[in-house]
Image (tube, rainbow, N blue to C red):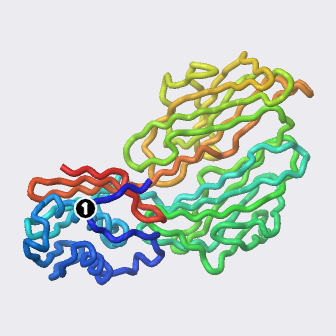
Amino acid sequence: MRLPRAGNMPARGPVSAGRGQRGVAALTIALIALFGMTILGGPMLGRVSLGLRSAEEYSPLAMNDTASAAEHALWRVEHDPDFLSSMTGSPPSAAYTLDFPEGTATITVTASSDALAGDGLGTALSVVPGNILPDTPSLVTFTMTIVNDDTVEHQISRVEANPKVFGPQYILGSTSGFTDIDPTYTAGRWRWELLPYATVDPFGGQATMSWLMEVDEGEGSYWTVGSARVEGVGTVYAPLTAKVRATELGDLDISLGVAPDQVSAGPEQLFDYTIVVTNSGADPLTLEWIRQFSSRDLGYEVGSTSGVTAADPHRNHDIINDRWVYTWDVEPSPLGPGAQATLTFRMRGTLLPGTYFAAGSAKVVEDPGGGFLSTVSTGETAPIVVRRAYDIHVELNGHTVDVETVLGAGGVEVLAWVES
């Protein structure tokens, strides 16, 4: 939700791909519009001097100057990539001053976290549905998401999907998102060569593409590795590979949710997960265990489990995807027709900008049709979107303004504005 801001700042539109080319002239125009007076000079990345106005033309309240200085900082966060790239330290920070008739405002802008490693690029590949019937042609949707927390835009020249030990078939004309071309099948993998290149905007911009595959495999789990080639950077691999599980289980459903699902990067935060297992069939089932797969940046909060069990889970390392696997033993836990088993737990972590997926699975002791062990999985879901926030602190003649804002493809979004 966008909150109203003090001052007379011009309306903010979407972030454009050419922000990095805007120079001193653009900032000068914005300052004229912001303050309604003439800029006399001064370096753009240091001190900016403003012309004086008469008492009749200018409010005598220093608080108004403080708010105007905060608005100026918001403008720089959105439109001045040179300023953001000049921020130093960990987390990055930068300070500058503005001269007003009533005094000099000191402005400090601090990011909530460092940028991502690897030029600020993160990639994830997900698939829905994650469970299909074995030996039955089924359509699944793959989605590739690329997040750019760098201070400059990046160009995507290629996307690849590399199925492991199975052969899904691409559905012609099904690609959508930042490209709609069909891929070629090369060396066992599907490849999209992008001309022209797809652009990922800086400062938290996202680019997404989806496509359909037909999967017809026997009982088992089948993985697909996703990657994107970025000009000037190289190949960026999705840290979580997408899994399709072929199983006869048709009477068991599972869902996974998380709250909050959008946060600012930087401080350690708590996340509440809920897994719901439902017996949608006509016969009773007995639940044996429930699992959750999540990033190693998130750790289980001891003692936080409730629902079908209150015991803490066992933890193992999924080497293929470099993530944690938590298993709750819940037997014996009978599920009658239409019954649900709910498991809630809490995880904590300090997250960098990007999107963090999780997956859930469950196992029943018997299947009404054949008496064999059965499992069901959510696929990769419950995404947590993490954006880098910027804290703006302004001081002028004993007055202060503190602003918290995040920056994405739609521009700046003010989360909090406090004046004192």
Residue lying farthest to the front in this orientation: 56
Count of numbered marks: 1
Q: Position of residue 94 (x, y in %)?
A: 25, 62
- On the image, the x and y values in percent for residue 33 come to 27, 76
Q: Amino acid at mark 1?
A: Ala
Image-based side of 311 in relation to 350, left or right: right
The answer to whether one can see residue 77 in this image is yes
Q: In the structure shown, which secondary structural element does the residue marked by tag 1 occupy?
A: helix
* Camera-side residue of 406 and 296: 406
Q: Quadrant of residue 378?
A: top right
Picture residue at 65% right of the left edge, 67% below the top: 177
Residue 61 position, x and y percent, is 12, 61
Residue 90 visible at all: no
Does 338 sit left or right of 55 as displayed?
A: right
- Quadrant of the rendered image containing residue 86: bottom left
Q: Position of residue 286 (x, y in %)?
A: 77, 20
Q: Is residue 61 left or right of residue 346?
A: left
Of the pair 342 and 151, the residue shown nearer to us = 342
Question: Badge 1: how crowded within 10 Å, few (<14), some, or many (20+)?
Answer: many
Where 53 sits versus 225, above or below?
below
Residue 364, above or below 208: above
Residue beneath the point at 21% across and 63% down: 95
Is 206 placed left or right of 116 in the picture? right
From the image, tell me which residue sits under label 1.
Answer: 70
